Each structure stands twice: as structure tokens, then as C-alpha cells.
Image: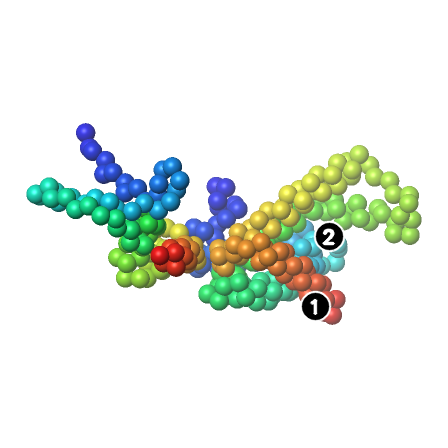
Amino acid sequence: MKKLLLNPFEKYGELQLLAVGIILTVAGSILAFYCNARFDGVIDLHFGEGLILSDPFIDNAINIVSLFIFLFILGLIINTKTRIIDVVTTILIARVPFYLLSLVNCTNIMVRIQNNIDPANLYNITFSTLEMITLLVFGLVTILFLIWFVVLLYNGFKTATNIKQTSHKVMFGIAILLAEALSKIILFIL
Amino acid sequence: MQIKTPKLPIACPSCQESLHVSQLSCPACSTQVSGNYPLPVLLRLPADEQAFILQFFLSGGSLKEMASQIGISYPTVRNRLDDIIEKVKQLSSEE
């Protein structure tokens, strides 16, 4: 079970991972639409109202492409035998924690909390006990799921490229940050 | 009771240096040959890596077939093979 959740790339074939990855990406995008979640960056998740169904799909497509560009180039630098399909399946599966995180807003509570905040008067924010508990739980769950995302992405990339050197691991971290910047730029332009 | 086949030791238990063959014997006539022969590179690999190479050979060099036989993914098999190739190269250069 631990292997399945943290490193399915070691055991399962690329076609199985690709099929599961595509199904979960579509399901995750639909879930995000119903939970008012936007994936506005490779490592971003925000809640807001007035979404149309295509929004989460476009967000996910941009995030997947941004991550692919940097991770595949880095993969080829590390190991010329790196295959496109292994990088794609890594990204598709690694994004699952983000899709699950959108469930936090299934009752629209995060949007309600956001709406109670007056941006013009940030020094006078008051939260009810329930809102405080919700924000605390959401914060902790987000940290855990973000770690889960990085662990999945790293394990998949490690399997795809046979990464070993510390310098390559640092470059992997930089590649994620560059992908985040690229996805933000594309979303800003759109 | 089944007698276990003894494993060929490849490293010195005290200092971990690679062992050499100093005696060979014929099981039919008990003739013994003494000398100082280094182990071939492949025999200096651990038993699981030797088994991996044998399986690779028996599957006709097909990593995909091997992956489905072992029940692990293709890149995992390829990475393991790459690691063994690196190790064999290192052992060969030490000779």
C-alpha cells in the first residue's frame, strides 16, 4: 500500500500508469469544478467562485505541460535514455494529491472564509472558532499533500532517469520552480 | 532434509577485499589444482545481480519481457541493468 501511494512507478507499467493518470486528471478537473478550485500554477491551489468547466482542465493542461518541458529536458541531461512516457506518467500521477485537496472546499467553506476578509482592512480580520479550526486543518493537510506531491514527483523522476547525484537532485528542485514560474506566466497571459 | 547449496564467497569476511581462487578440485577423481586465480568479473558480482544477468540473457535481452516476468516496470529494470553495467565497468577497470 505504501509503495502504491508513494512509488507506483517502480512496479506498474507505463500503459497502466498512463490510463490511471488520464482518468484521475479528468476526474480531478471535474472535482475541482464542483469544489470551485483553481490550479493556478504547478504548486498552487486557490478557491473562488464563477468557474466554468473548462477552467480546471486548462489549468491542469498548462501545469502538466510546464512540468513536462523542464523535467523532460532535465531528464535528457541526466540520462539520454529517459523516455517521454515515463516523465508524462510521473507528472499525471504526482498531481493526484492536488486534485484530492480541492475536496477541502466541497461545502464552499473556504470561499465563505475568503469573502469575510476585507482586503482593504487586513489588520482587522476576525475568524470564528470553526473558521480557525478549518484554516488550521486545511494548512496541515495542504503541507502533507504538498509533500506527497513532491515525493511522488521525485520517485517517478528517479525511476524515469535513474537520478543519483546530489547536483541532479538540486536541479530537479529548480526545474519544479521554473515550471511554476512558466505556468504562472502562461496563466497570466491567458 | 534438503542440503542448501553453499554460496560462493566473493569478498574477504575480514577486510572485504575481492577473494582469489587458490584451490580447485575434480569431484570425480579428487585431483586438486592449486594456484592463485582471480575471480572472473561476473562472479565478483553479488548473487542477485548474477541472477539478474542470467535472466536478462534467458529472456533474449528483452527488458520489456523481463519487466513483465519479474512484475516491475520497464524503467526499473533498465535502471538496474545500467547500475550493473556501471559496476562491471568499474570491476573491469580495476583488473
In this view, which residue lies farthest toward the front? B35
Instruction: Residue A175: name its quadrant.
Output: bottom right
Chain label for disc 1: A
What residue is pinned by disc 2?
A47
Q: Residues within 10 Å of mark 1 (few under 14, many from 20)?
A: some
So how many labels did they put on this image?
Answer: 2
Chain label for disc 2: A
What residue is pinned by disc 1?
A186
- The reply to whether residue A125 is in sight is yes
Left or right of B14 on screen, residue B30: left
Q: Residue at x 83, y 39 (%)?
A: A127
Classify mark 1: helix, strand or loop: helix
In this view, which residue lies farthest toward the left? B29
Q: Position of residue A47 (x, y in %)?
A: 73, 52
Left or right of B79 on screen, residue A53: right
Figure quadrant of the C terminus of chain A: bottom right
Tell which circle, 1 or 2, labels the residue nearer the N-terminal end. Answer: 2
Q: Residue at x 78, y 37 (%)?
A: A132
From what the image shows, is residue A54 above or below residue B71?
A: below
Classify mark 2: helix, strand or loop: strand
Q: Position of residue A50 (x, y in %)?
A: 74, 58
Q: Residues within 10 Å of mark 2 (few under 14, many from 20)?
A: many
